[in-house]
Image (spheres, rainbow, N blue to C red):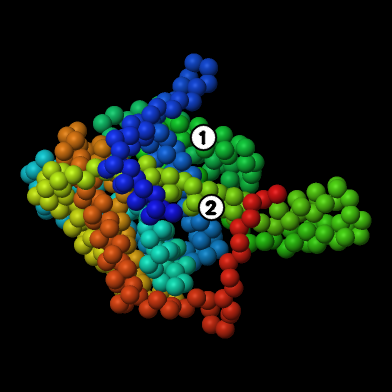
Amino acid sequence: MLLSAAFIALIWANVSGSYETFWHTEFSLRFGGVALTEDLRHWVNDGLMVIFFFSIGLEISREMTLGELRGGRAIAAPALAALGGLTIPALLYVAFNAGGPGASAWGIAISTDTAVLLGVLALVGPRCPDQLRIFLLALAVVDDIGAIAAIAIFYTDHVAWTPLLIAIGLFVATVALRFVNFWRTPIYVLIGVVMWVSVLESGIHPSVVGVLMGLLVNAYAPQRRDLMRLQLAGTSLLVDPTPERALAAQAAAVGTISPNERLQLRIQPWSSYVIVPLFALANAGIVLDGETLRAAAASPITWGIIVALVVGKLFGVSAGTWVALRTGVGRVPDTLRWGQLVGGAALSGIGFTVALFVTDLAFDDEALKSQATIGILVGSVLAALLGWLIFRLLGERGGQCAPSGLPVLPPRPWRPPA
């Protein structure tokens, strides 16, 4: 669905002149005398995509508590990999553009697009890529935080401090609520919405709000007392089925699952099958005429981005991972092989969301913007192809799917909650 949406966007932009007109249509939310007005593209990129980043934060939180990222060493490996993936691409881009009009746009080359990365990994990655997916997910989150920090420091002309301080205060309040184990979904939704508006008004990209809120949602294994309560409620229902006992049994069953996992069940289908394809539809459309392509072919901006994404990300992420493992600072799951890690490093060169955002901030000249955008698209496609090739040659696609001796169960189909 993601690739189909991107393909439709390219056709739409090159066949009809209505593509940009449609996505620049303004949409307003008004409450009394207060209004929030953005065009449709910004509502997708800065609004709906926050839900995608929220789902990422949920998954990272769960893995840090119950899964593959438990402990400092498990987090250190993707963090060092992300650091290498931020540094080397930036240096390569500057080497191509030192002294030129695009020298300050190095932030374009450092971002990994989490949504597209995970989508392409599902298509070209190992047969059982769960551990690799979690590793790349953690890497991409650190990468996003680094890229967003770069935007805030180097590409934000004016930061509105009052809204930013409000957002920081709300984040501290959310941490305090978690500390006292207060879980009321409407309260968290209200805090998240106000925090999102505050960060948006501050001039900083609001995707960080989704990640931070997701990381704060608690994840835990089923507790014995909750299972006992469910058993009692279920037995009571079987003995004397009544509406009241049915509701009690339902509440007991829900109570055995952590808020993190309940939210993932509700949000993930919307994130994967609606928001991410809509994002591709809103951003992948670019006019590819002869003049634009010729200018891009001779542009150090275009080539700097391509080399940084394809070569810089591959070597930066691989080097960071090697340092983490070599020094013993970090670790990765035993089921992962170096071929898979290198293939994932190549796929991390797929840049889209934040790269396009930095392009809009770094350049006022439309011609330079087009050259940068073409570099992002070409570099991302080449990074995906390189990752596919590495997985084919080195990735050992038939990797271990489950611990030895355990059967591999098919995934349960998702059904909407009653």
Residue closest to the eye, 184 or 123: 123
Q: In the image, what residue occupies the spot 33% across and 37% down?
A: 19
How many labels were placed on the picture? 2
Q: Which residue is mark 1?
A: 193
The spot of residue 47 in percent (x, y) is 44, 38
- Quarter assignment of residue 21: top left
Q: Residue at x 71, y 53 (%)?
A: 254
Q: Position of residue 305 (x, y in %)?
A: 20, 52
In this view, 308 is above or below 386 = above
Task: Give me the residue at 34% from left, 45% from top.
Answer: 9
| Nearer mark to the viewer, of 1 and 2 | 2
Are circles 1 and 2 on residues that touch, CB within 8 Å? no
Determine the secondary structure under disc 1.
helix
Depicted 27 relative to depicted 223: above or below: above
Q: Which residue is mark 2?
A: 268
Please identify the residue farthest to the top as the structure is shown: 33
Q: From the top left corner, tell me how far across and down residue 93 is, in percent.
A: 16, 52
- Extreme residue toward the right, this view: 240
What amino acid type should be assigned to the residue bearing mark 2?
Answer: Gln
Secondary structure under the numbered disc 2 in the rendered image: helix
